[in-house]
Amino acid sequence: MTRKLPLRSILAVATLASGLSACAPLVVGGAVGTVMVASDRRTSGAQLEDQGIELRSASHLREQLGTRARISVTSYNRRALLTGEVANARDKALAEQIVSQVDNVTGLVNELDITASPSLTQQANDTLITGKVKAALVDTKDLSASAFKVVTERGTVYLMGRVSQHEADKATEVTRSVSGVARVVRVLEIISNDELRRIQAGNNTAPVEDRSAK
């Protein structure tokens, strides 16, 4: 697994054995779905840049890899996650190179598999798992589900977002308990509790609608 991350982020990866009391094995990363703009913890500029990163990356990948690869690019706060399948190690490295050179990309996690594309049944199952994970996050107290972006590939759930350590650990615990999840990969930007409080205070500000007579 190849990662290019800024110095501000520290990414540590550890895989737990799959036989741990029916829990999904876990790949943990402390670093660096669709969420509503009003409750998104990214700045509006970062959200627009993430959309641009995804669109430009997809375009460049199609130009250079064509149909011989199935690659999804998910960007959160300018950190790009690559998931999907490629035919060989050369294409995996090429895809990483292509996306890493896209404007505004500050970090990259390459989770591409060298294998054949999944069946329609597997893709449908991944969609179902994503929905169940999102629902579980919504139902969890003291957890802002809108702070997370959820991506699922072949039963592996990737969690992205800007969250506190407590939120990261809680969301991981919840996700591991969802049926069908094979493992959990955290691609999270860990923020301090002080920063979290500042974000929450900003999001709790009531909107003002001015209908005064002019």
Image: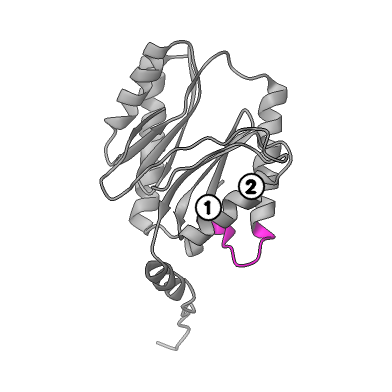
* Residue drawn at the location 49% of the way across and 79% of the way down: 206
Residue 48 versus residue 115 in the image, above or below: below
Q: Position of residue 133 (x, y in %)?
A: 66, 47
Instruction: Determine which residue is flagged by label 2.
Output: 175
Residue 103 versus residue 203 in the image, above or below: above
As for residue 204 lying within the magenta part, the answer is: no
Q: Marks 2/1: CA distance? A: 12 Å
Amino acid type of the residue that numbered disc 2 sits on in the rendered structure: Thr
In this rendering, would 201 be left or right of 116?
left
Q: Position of residue 105 (x, y in %)?
A: 30, 39
Q: Position of residue 212 (x, y in %)?
A: 45, 88
* Residue drawn at the location 71% of the way across and 38% of the way down: 128
Front one among 15 and 122: 15
Q: Quadrant of residue 131?
A: top right
In this rendering, would 178 be left or right of 169?
right
Q: Quadrant of residue 126?
A: top right
Q: Is residue 177 visible?
A: yes
Instruction: Determine which residue is flagged by label 1.
Output: 148
